[in-house]
């Protein structure tokens, strides 16, 4: 048997080493291309309506609120940045997404729109435009009619007066609110006599969680009676008198 000399083995080892280095470079390049470069070109935003929208009439039969469910059918997180109605921007305080405005791919988000200065009219069409944080625009034509308009029904179930912690002098009024029906009701403000308290974020009540509590820090006095009113984003107001005992 004829053996190879050290000088003959060395070129083969060098060639193998070069192939190994080249293979590692190709793997690293493919990894960067697949996970960092190609997603940039393949990613896109696409926003669709997931369920039928509906309009909400308040206790005065004024149609002041839109509830719509969006679905992110794109490939990246979608952030709602602005909402426009008929070419006019809606104040950021007059719209909000349930659990925020970020929608992950294949996920949905319920959004309410309730412009304070606008009352929607039965039989009319409205253009709703959603602008994302990446400045993509998605427009929808929405019609108001009796079949997609619902009247909100919400009440103050109970008011209770307490201190927390129990041994402290920090006084609170708890307000238990209940919604009847299967629509979204959002409480935005509480009035105790002439004092106003903004509920932030708004208290959402729907068919899945129709009862919840609002906690207000207030220096109540035992034996005194207070006029307590809740106001929804649709403009309904519900009032009770409660005595601190």
Image (tube, rainbow, N blue to C red):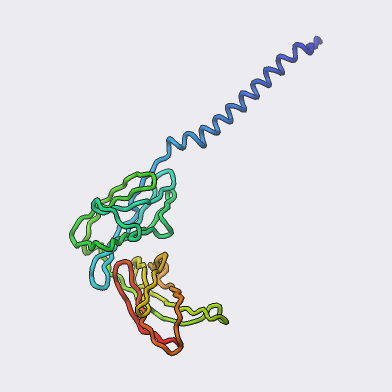
Residue 59 location, quadrant:
bottom left
As drawn, the residue found furthest toward the bottom would be 223
Residue ID at (43%, 59%): 99
| Residue 85 shows in this picture | yes
Q: Position of residue 105 (x, y in %)?
A: 43, 48
**Above or below for 218 versus 81:** below
Residue ID at (42%, 68%): 209
| Residue 207 shows in this picture | no
Q: Position of residue 244 (x, y in %)?
A: 44, 86
Locate the N terminus by quadrant: top right
Relative to 19, 34 lies left or right: left
Residue 43 location, quadrant:
top left
Q: Position of residue 178 (x, y in %)?
A: 38, 74
**Above or below for 194 versus 188:** below
**Above or below for 12 versus 120:** above
Q: Position of residue 192 (x, y in %)?
A: 38, 78
Relative to 12, 138 lies left or right: left
Residue ID at (47%, 34%): 38
Q: How many marks?
A: 0
């Amino acid at each position: 048997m004829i053996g190879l000399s050290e000088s003959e083995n060395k070129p083969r080892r060098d060639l193998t080493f070069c192939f190994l280095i080249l293979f590692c470079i190709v793997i690293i390049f493919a990894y960067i291309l697949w996970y960092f470069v190609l997603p940039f070109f393949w990613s896109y935003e696409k926003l669709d309506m997931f369920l039928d929208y509906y309009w909400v009439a308040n206790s005065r039969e004024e149609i002041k609120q839109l509830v719509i469910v969006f679905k992110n059918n794109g490939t990246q997180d979608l952030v709602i940045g602005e909402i426009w109605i008929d070419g006019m921007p809606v104040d950021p305080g007059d719209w909000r997404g349930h659990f925020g405005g970020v929608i992950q791919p294949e996920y949905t988000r319920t959004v309410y729109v309730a412009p304070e200065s606008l009352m929607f009219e039965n039989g009319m069409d409205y253009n709703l435009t959603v602008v994302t944080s990446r400045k993509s625009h998605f427009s929808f034509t929405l019609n108001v009619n009796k079949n997609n308009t619902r009247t909100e029904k919400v009440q103050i179930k109970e008011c209770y007066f307490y201190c927390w912690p129990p041994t402290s002098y920090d006084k609170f009024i708890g307000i238990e609110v209940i919604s009847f029906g299967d629509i979204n009701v959002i409480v935005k403000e509480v009035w105790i006599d002439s004092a106003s308290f903004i509920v932030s974020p708004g208290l959402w009540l729907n068919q899945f969680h129709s009862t919840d509590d609002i906690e207000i820090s207030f220096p109540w006095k035992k034996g005194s009676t207070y006029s307590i009113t809740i106001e929804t984003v649709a403009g309904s107001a519900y009032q009770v008198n409660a005595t601190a005992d």
